[in-house]
Amino acid sequence: MAKVGFLGCGKIGQSMVEHIKKKETHQITFIQDPFFKCEGELKEKIIVQGLDSFYEGTDLIIEAATADVLKENIELILKHSNLLVLSVTAFSDDDFTDKVKKLCSKYGRHIYFPHGAILGMDGLFDARSIVNSVIIETVKNPKSLGREDTERTVVYEGTTREACKLYPRNVNVHATIALSGIGFDKTYSRIVSDPAVTTNTHNICIKGEGISFTLNISSFSTGGVTGIYTPISACGSLDRILGGDEYCTFV
Ligand SMILES: NC(=O)c1ccc[n+]([C@@H]2O[C@H](COP(=O)([O-])OP(=O)(O)OC[C@H]3O[C@@H](n4cnc5c(N)ncnc54)[C@H](O)[C@@H]3O)[C@@H](O)[C@H]2O)c1
């Protein structure tokens, strides 16, 4: 039975908490979220601040808060546990990534990047040595982007590194694509605000020596930054990390 802690417990975190509770195969050791409210047995697991005494003995910490919260807690997390990270835009900061690599090496830890709102990261990672162009376009309702556009507007075009700085809560998929592919400076991002849509759509075009992949992924938006697919896919990633009860694994 693995011991799992949560840093951030909003839409994605709560669905993973429910998943763990339903399966009864793992134990939730703490939920660090100053704004999370619940009743029952989980109430006593809520903490507002990370401390050695809470983190000690945890096998996996799931970060589902924000890139800044991840950065604030990274040293304590990796001192005690492996990490499943949702706020992937934090890794567009090379100084942070260097620090993470050093901490992983120092404490013998491992980071898991889930495919999250999109699919196929394993395939892109396998192909990266022959990939030379990656373009990702995201189309969201202006409300999800914190904007008030009344017509379709291209709000950003350029490197994924800059997109992560400008829209850290909205381009985690761009960051995951950059990390698994050709990096934050070579990956090209486009963000479109469209008041006519109720979905989060990601159009990904990957080209390389003898290969061409096009992925179009659309997921109904329930408000906020996260579409309907991500909480489901995050639970699948968790099962693959901790060892699910299926007879097979897709690799
Ligand atoms: N990788 C992906 O494909 C992908 C897809 C969707 C969302 N995300 C990212 O995942 C993260 C979580 O998304 P969500 O939809 O669950 O967001 P959410 O806003 O529903 O939940 C975030 C939670 O973090 C908590 N929080 C805020 N400050 C905190 C602090 N100082 N310490 C601990 N917790 C704190 C909030 O109270 C909230 O409960 C976000 O960064 C989001 O951008 C990633």
Image (cartoon, grey):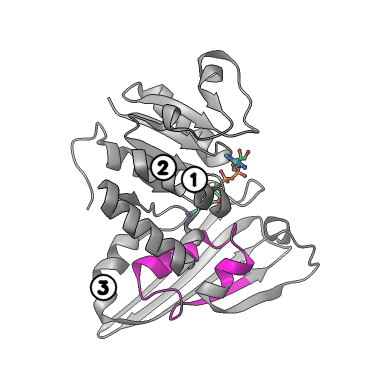
Q: Disc 2 designates what residue?
A: 77
Magenta residues span: 163-191
Amino acid on which disc 1 is placed: Asn
The first of marks 3 and 1 along the sequence is: 1
Tell me if residue 189 is in the magenta stretch: yes
Q: Is mark 2 on a helix, strand or loop?
A: helix
Q: Residues within 10 Å of mark 1 (few under 14, many from 20)?
A: some
**What residue is at 78 percent from the left and 67 percent from the top?**
149
Ligand 1 quadrant assignment: top right
In the depicted structure, whether residue 12 falls above or below residue 201: above
Q: Position of residue 156 (x, y in %)?
A: 64, 76
Label 1 near label 2: C-beta < 8 Å?
A: yes
Left or right of residue 18: residue 101: left
Q: Is residue 150 magenta?
A: no
Residue at coordinates 41% horizontally, 23% vertically from top-left?
A: 22
N-term-proximal mark, 2 vs 3 = 2
Residue 163 is left or right of residue 186, and the answer is right
| Coordinates of residue 143 in the picture (x, y in percent) | 73, 56
Q: What residue type is disc 3 on?
A: Ala
How far apart, in angstroms, are the residues tagged by discs 3 and 1?
Answer: 33 Å
What residue is shown with label 3? 127
Q: Does the closest atom of ligand 1 sit within 8 Å of the Cβ of label 1?
A: yes
Q: In this view, does 187 lie above or below 8?
A: below
Q: Which mark is residue 73?
A: 1
